[in-house]
Amino acid sequence: MARQALAALGTSIFPEMTRLAVERGAVNLSQGFPDFDGPPEIVDAAVTALKAGHNQYGRSMGLPALVEQIAAHQRRCWGIEVDPLTEVCAFAGATEGIAAAMIGLLEAGDEVVLFEPYYDGYPATVAMAGATARVVTLRAPAFRVEESALRAALSPRTRMIVVNSPHNPTGRVLSVEELDVIARVCVERDLVALTDEVYEHLVFAGARHVPLATRPGMRERTVALSSTGKTFSFTGWKVGWATGPAPLIAGVQRAHQFLTFCAATPLHAAMATALERFQQSFFTSLLAEYTARRDFLVDALRAAGFSPIVPEGTYFVLCDLCGLTDEDDVTFARRLIDEAGVAAIPPSVFYTHAKEEGRRLLRFAFCKREQTLDEAARRLRAWHASRPRERAT
């Protein structure tokens, strides 16, 4: 029988939407993984590592070559100095890093502040750690962090705040002012910040990613998570990491050693090569490609009657369904698969307290090939043209 705290979370929506997309032959814009590979040189590096004998357990906290490149990345991109051997821990993906941080740093009964909508792994790992989630709602269309709402969620048992920026699923990139609100609260209450920054290199013109660890008083209390999956388009390799002060990273490592001990050695070796070889020019090119994909999908969604909220970062677009339907997001998402042949994610599953906020939204992923997005746009146009003039149902 499933543990009650986990059973209450239900089943992830992602397998259902992908299954329906496959069964109906729909274009899958639901799950956030590319339908293309990253640079072939990174694949070659993995093959080289396999053939060179990097096939046994590696150093638990990460291969020396990888953690050194992660430390170099933090210094080069964000001006953050970390000791590669004591302040970096590599995982089987950033999601394992979330679990290791929760289990390694929280005591049973601690409280963790989450901002909803959230990546659905957050409340699950809070439950695994025996802690309790306290939820702050970010409300559409601005999705801003409000200091009064954040402070209202605090209690004497609050131990950690989880911050995701660039933010999935809203596409928000938190401003310096919002980060400083969070920083003040963390310093005043002696809280740990767990930051999910996996989309750190997918920030569009007009926005700027600022790591929370760079704000006053935060270097010594922030565990920052990132990965190579989103940046290099190898999500299935599951190569993620955490950086932060040695005492916190030691706590994360205590859990990691009993979760996976170490991740796939040849893939860690390959990603060390990737971080060394592909730097700012690659990130600039990546961003240009994703900007074009974002703009194309936003235009296609508008032409199909949706009201997209243009993202500042990530590779997701949230759409307001107001005026298009009065159905809830789950019902409409299932119907869109059947009628239009396009799959999206209903975001109400990313809310705990304010599910009504998510019920009027839909999330589309644009980390897809040009041909995939073209076909989705064609289907959405045909669906829109076939609908009755009165748009609400």
Image (spheres, helix red, strand yellow):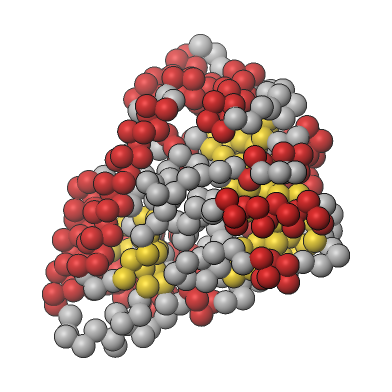
> In the picture, which quadrant includes the N terminus?
bottom right
As drawn, 132 above or below 99: below
Q: Looking at the image, which residue is at 36% across and 60% down?
A: 310
Q: Name the spot of residue 198 as percent of width and height, x first.
A: 52, 43
| Viewer-closest of 129 and 347 | 347
Horizontal side of 305 relative to 172 (left or right) equals left
> Does residue 179 show up?
yes
Task: Tell which of 301 and 291 is nearer to you.
Answer: 291
Q: Is residue 123 left or right of residue 251?
A: left
Q: Position of residue 215 (x, y in %)?
A: 66, 44
Is 95 or 85 nearer to us in this picture? 85
Residue at point 41% right, 72% down? 361
Whether residue 253 is visible, yes or no, is: no
Q: Quadrant of the C terminus?
A: bottom left
Horizontal placement of 70 versus 184: left or right?
left
Please name whichever residue, 134 or 25, is drawn nearer the observer in this view of the structure. Answer: 134
For the view shown, which residue lies furthest in the top direction?
52
Q: Is residue 118 above or below residue 179?
A: below
